[in-house]
Image: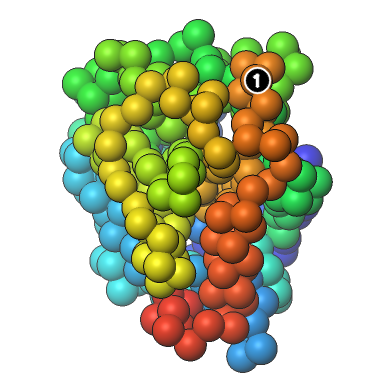
Amino acid sequence: MIEKARKIWLNGEFVEWGEARVHVLTHTLHYGLGVFEGIRAYKTQKGTAVFRLDEHIKRLINSAKIVNLKIPFTYDELMEATLETVRINGLEECYIRPLVYVDYGEIGLYPLNNPVGVAIAAWSWGAYLGEEGLKNGIKAKISSFTRNPVNVAMTKAKVCGSYVNSQLAKMEAIDTGYDEAILLDAEGYVSEGSGECIFLVRNGILKTTPLTSILEGITRNSVMDIAKHLWYKVTEERFSRDELYIADEVFFAGTAAEITPIVNIDGRTIGNGKRGPVTTKIQEAFFDIVRGKVKEFEGWLFYV
Ligand code: PMP
């Protein structure tokens, strides 16, 4: 259950949490054309900081552009509204959810005569795949559902409706005793998790899916920079599910999931079945960076 905060930013003003409502005939609710973001803010010694806020707002604007929605606010307004949402709710650490939606108006499939609404909510949300998962790793399943192919739902846009695909995969994984799903692309290569990018480690080298057919993950990008900072080699290459089975280490990278080790895939133990040394180093560096302890990466923090 979402842990309620006080206020939600809705179309330019703050409303009480319980008053942030839309009509049941809101267009997006029916057909899924909307775009959103998932952002985290962490507590640092200098106060709360939103991690890579600029990149998230840019991606939100790009997502809207891809699906033809005109956001009635500027980049600067969205940046400030997000910071203000964290501030006004007095949250030290939180998850932030901006949503751009097609509002009430016409109900035919053509959406562009309706107004576009924007909401930004923030609330306390701990580790998405569990504290235990961060430490000891999780079990993942290769999904029987194919990732939305690039010309079906465009993967560079974080579109509401595309997450039906993610939810089908997630339900299948959870209902069969796993923690998370790994989806393959239409050609059978590994793409990403239901809401995370994926990395494998073999012989000390990290490998991740190329960006062609996945969301441009901001945590993925951060991991690549962190890995280079720690002198690891990183490659972006297509790989198949069996390469995951024989990897030394595998982990998910995403805003919600942060850096979560995967220690079992389809019943096969990955490496020695524990969080591996490379994953541990990357994870430690990541949490140090988001909490403002690494000078070189201060530029990623947007103080509230
Ligand atoms: N892939 C998908 C499908 C996602 O929903 C997410 C979460 N936004 C990610 C990857 C990870 O992206 P990020 O690190 O920017 O949160």
**Residue 185 screen position, x and y as percent:** 34, 20
Q: Residue furthest front?
A: 203
**Residue 123 screen position, x and y as percent:** 68, 58
> For numbered disc 1, what is the local secondary structure?
strand
> Which residue appears at 42% of the width and 84% of the height?
296
> Which residue appears at 55% of the width and 66% of the height?
286
Amino acid at dot 1: Arg
As drawn, 189 above or below 128 = above
Quarter holding the N terminus is top right
As drawn, 208 above or below 119 = above
Q: Residue furthest top?
A: 144
> Which residue appears at 72% of the width and 59% of the height?
124
**Which quarter of the picture shows residue 251?**
top right
> Which residue appears at 41% of the width and 61% of the height?
232
Query: Is residue 68 in view from this perspective?
Result: yes
Q: Residue furthest bottom?
A: 46
Is 175 situated left or right of 225 in this image? Answer: right
Query: Residue beneath label 1, please?
Result: 268
**Residue 229 screen position, x and y as percent:** 41, 72
Quarter holding the C terminus is bottom right
Is 197 situated left or right of 63 in this image? Answer: right
Query: Is residue 40 in view from this perspective?
Result: no
* Towards the viewer: 72 or 93: 93
* Towards the viewer: 180 or 17: 180
* Towards the viewer: 195 or 67: 195
